[in-house]
Amino acid sequence: MPRHPVIVADVIEDHTFKKQGKTSHVKRYKKGRLLGKGGFAHCYKITSYDSHRIYACKIIAKASLTKPSARSKLWNEIRLHRDLSHKHIVRFERFFEDDMNVYIVLELCHNQSLMEMVRRRRRLTDPEVKCYMWQLLLCLKYLHGLKIIHRDLKLSNLFLDKDMNLKLGDFGLTTKLANADERKRTICGTPNYIAPEILDARKGHSFEVDIWAIGVIMYTMLVGRPPFETSSIKATYKRIRSSAYKFPENVAISKDARDLIAVILRTNPEKRPTLDGIARHRFFSKEPFPATLPTTSLKVPTDLSELPVSSLITVPGGSPTDATSKSYRPVLGDRTNYTANAHPAPKSHPPLPPRGAMATRSTTRNQIPRARSSGMPQPSSMAKERGVPRATSAQQGGWKRHEENPVEEERDLRDLNDNLRRTILNKASPKPPPPSRPHPGFHEGIVDDTGNCVRAGTTSKVQAGAEYAWDVVWVTRWADYTSKYGMGYALSDGTYGVCFNDQTKIAYHTNEHKFFNYVERRSSQDNSSRMSSHSTENYPAKITKKVLLLGHFKDYLSRSSSSTKSKPPYIGQSPHPNPSYANPTQGESNPVMVKKWMKAEHAMVFRLSNQTVQLVFHDQTEILLSSEHQSVCYSDSNRVRRFYPIGEGQRFEPALEKRMRFCREVLKRMLGSRSRDNSNSKSRPRRP
């Protein structure tokens, strides 16, 4: 409770402008509910009468600022906070005063703080802890780069905005060093989070006190209570001085988490890891973790299988001992932002969980050479082998290109794009036909979850060759390991393949034949690529590493399909992930392969070798565009598939029309990138 009462009027007036003589306008705010109380302040929700924007307002009674030290402390907080600008720091809006109080207007964090979240949930899961630890590391990297030490890191000062991003607040104990070697000797902080060198003020303290607090925060999120908490402050300080803590036996905590906490909570500050050392620890690098969490995580644990693979963060590999190393390249970077694997799903279209349990897929006797371990990723040394060179990916306008289209595909893409344009721009009828009543002039088909085609409103199968009921082949799952190797995928006809970072491709079909196909990198001379077929028992030595990687991807994707629990990390999937493999569409001599893929703003996009473009939207709807059949197969939010022709006069329901417009943008991007690449290839000198 504040030592002095904070009296606040229902309407708060800011006369700052009037006093400065710039304008006679007075800014007014409506006082809302009380958000919290501190030692010297109350925090209220306020609403601007001018803009109707909602803020948090920290209000300090002037009666509590009679001592010069108190006034100096408040001014220091305002001076430091107002100059900060970072995604994970509560935004400072303005401050003003009246005869009674000082008002600090701040960004409102709608989802309270991590303290309330942990109290409600009792404890958080490893991926959730990684998410918020990572955001905190980024924030501290920014602060420490400015020679600023927060000195009061704790769950109640880590707020959550409306998008569940972590926001560091309360800079009342924050200090700025004159130089990196300066030591502070003020005894300050919150008892459960205070570092041992602060208690022993003789040598002073520096940035390492924030590192210590990170360890306490991590332990508290995983266990549900601080590691040194006792019934008395004296006993708590005794434990802190010797770093005496233990993990409860009834709480499952991973070995990597235990190790990282132990590395951080060292009494000697010089032996604690740096921020980049923490980021490189195996706790973060072993598996990908979410960049942000859904609001449901406020009450229930987050299921990674419900998050798009594009929203996960992948950290370069490390080890427990790496955390204390000072010599490697920084992981967090020097600026304020970080990049996840790809563009997250748009806020207006949250990802939907797949419906139904995953069916177990049977294995085949004839397999490509089996990897020593079925887990992914494999040892990083394999990425250094000549067989799997790494390549940087160009980014243009938010699109990530990993392969170039061959020249001969341009005609098919242009035909599909032209027909799609005529379909979308046609205004013959102001109203689309109801989804349940096919428009005269075309047949509507429905494909069930096994890939079988049936007539709308019936249960009989469409006869082979029936109009707009073509054999559907699509990407059922994919595994994004482009940070090391490439993009692995599984097709509905039983094919497994990999698009490697060096623009080579490999594909293997799980039928009775023991052959796989390998596509070399496109020639710069004639703009063409060459495909060769090899036996799984006899193939060129130069592609051995890629064959082994194909085996790793196949095992990983197969394991994800047979899992009855959550979807493994790195995995993305179609809304139809478990088709029937009874009738493969093509033999090993002419297999369907992924020729190009990209991550777009709203969807994952695949260009298949059977003249099909597949778009898996983040809301788990899906579109298959066929250049050969000039038609579209649309899977709606209920996972029901329907076929429609593409051409002038065709009309779609609103949900499909919206997605078709996006499809056309995808085709334009494909054609544009191909044209630029061809132009560049002609002018670009060949490598010696």
Image (cartoon, rainbow, N blue to C red):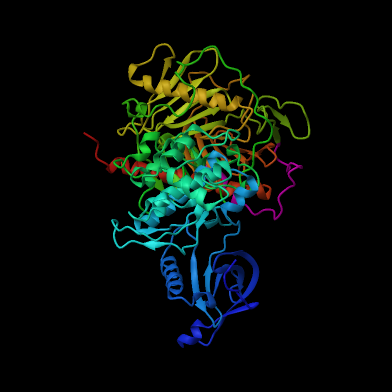
As drawn, 19 above or below 183: below
Image location (x, y in percent) of residue 255? 49, 32
Q: Determine the residue located farthest toward the right in the rendered image.
A: 458
As drawn, 30 above or below 380: below
Q: Considering the image in quadrants, where does the N terminus appear? A: bottom right
Return the residue nearer the eye: 650 or 361. Answer: 361
Image location (x, y in percent) of residue 243? 45, 43
Q: Considering the image in quadrants, where does the C terminus appear? A: top left
Q: Is residue 168 visible?
A: yes
Q: On the rendered structure, is 401 left or right of 477?
A: left
Q: Which residues are magenta?
A: 415-444
Q: Determine the residue located farthest toward the left in the rendered image.
A: 688
Q: On the rendered structure, is 331 left or right of 356?
A: left
Q: Is residue 493 magenta?
A: no
As drawn, 534 above or below 224: above
Return the residue nearer the eye: 529 or 235. Answer: 235
Residue at 57% from the left image edge and 55% from the top image edge: 113
Magenta stretch: helix, strand or loop mostly: loop
Q: On the rendered structure, is 675 left or right of 465?
A: left
As drawn, 608 above or below 81: above
